[in-house]
Image (cartoon, rainbow, N blue to C red):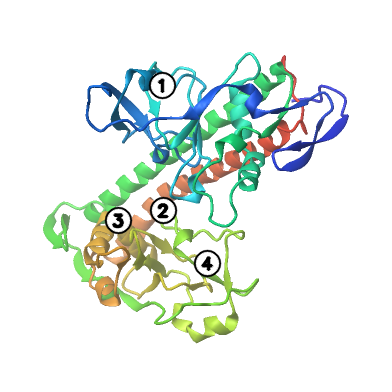
Amino acid sequence: MSDLKANAKKTVRVGARDISIPDDWEVVNLKGLIETSGSGEWGEEVETDTNNKEASVLRSGDITLDGKLLTEDIATRYLSDEDYKQHAIEPFDIVIVSSSGSERHIGKKWLAPETIDQNKYHFTNFLYRIRLDESKCHPKFIYYFLCSDYETAFIQSISPTSTGLQNLDTGSYEDLTIPFPPLSEQHRIADILSTVDKQIQQTEDMVKISVQIKQGLMQELLQRGISHNTYQAMQLGPISIEIPSSWDITTLGDVTSLVHRYPNYYNIDYQSEGVPEVRVAMLNEEGQIEMDPQELRYISQETSDEYPKTVLETGDSVVVVRGRSLDKVGYVTDEVAGANMNPNLMRVSPNKTINSKFMNYLLLSEIGQKQLNLYSSGGNINTLKKSDVTRIHLPLPPLEEQSEIVDRIGCAERKVKHERTTLRDLQELKRGLMQDLLTGKVRVDPDA
């Protein structure tokens, strides 16, 4: 990247904001770049006389928040010949979620790859397809702009404010104004952002591999241990496993000094500062509690003092005991210690008979997870009682072997953490590049 032209700027209206762009850039309406656009067709569940073309149709849930296509559960419907032709997705089509039960999902979008097979996918009436005129613009450049904060702000500006956004006003959406560099510069910007996207995808793949390695290691070590020759078959709730003959079977209640949740903690007034509150959303898939400063909520010291047993200490685990899914467990590190937790979590404090990390790994493993789900009560909101949690059965090796198992799993865990950090850095790099490149703050050399 380099300063290609003079730094003369002009202020223009882009989306819902006034921004500065290079003096030699234009501003265009999205509508003027579109070759064709419109919503799709849901079709019929079974073949009829008129709807007899079998099609794999995309729904709003098939597109992720980060612009990927989920292909594991694509629906099959039957379309007429006309709809089959009209609603087939072609290379570089931009497919946007225009209708959803969740406001958060309106505006999700996916860019069809250049190599997509003919008639591989069709789109439904929940989606809105834009096909751009490639003689006027580079579709990838426009797609990246549509993924920017400027587009998000514009969607919010054209949304109804009283009822909440459930449907995208596609007519108004096409009035979106876009900063528009020369076509050669669009190509170079798209190439740079595509390169970062490839690095992000490669890192996401590495995260998945690292997680699989860790999970496999947990499965092996938490059931088979280290250097054992004889094993005994045991039934732990719904789990039938073989564990080393020298290991004991215990319950979570026997290896804990405290299992506790708030008896009554609702309608709390949050503060701008105070004692951080740990919530379910802060527990990640790896059993860690993410204390993102931008996501933290605080309760007063006085409120926290009313409930001293829910003030977390290093080595505690927190278990989700109320919600739609009870599969999350978090480990309390020094960074988290001193925080309080909300009523959807239960504090589990180990005693001296069990390594705190070993206990956390067991709760995260198949052994713990299946029992947590077995003991939860049904309904729209699942719940767990203290008596349910304390009766969970666990294999218990000697403390020395527990520590060695923790060390080995910890190596794999650090690998996952490193890959996740790299991924976050790349995602932040992309956000910064989009901010700079899509507005001309940083110019690129089209011939580079």
Residue located 40% across and 40% down the image: 208
Residue underneath mark 3:
365
Residue type at mark 3: give it. Ser
Foreground pick, 342 / 123: 123
Residue underneath mark 2:
286
From the viewer's perspective, tell me whether residue 305 is left or right of residue 51.
right
Residue type at mark 1: give it. Ala
Q: CA distance from mark 2 to mark 3?
A: 10 Å
Residue 217 in the image: above or below residue 23: below
Residue underneath mark 4:
336
The mark that comes first in sequence, 3 or 4, is: 4
Task: Kindly check if marks 4 and 1 are in contact, taking CB atoms under 8 A apart as contact.
Answer: no
Foreground pick, 13 / 37: 37
Residue type at mark 2: give it. Glu
Name the front one of labels 1 and 3. 1
Question: In terms of image quadrants, where is residue 237?
Answer: bottom left
Query: Element type at marker 1?
Result: loop
Q: CA distance from mark 4 to mark 1?
A: 50 Å
Q: Is residue 147 visible?
A: no
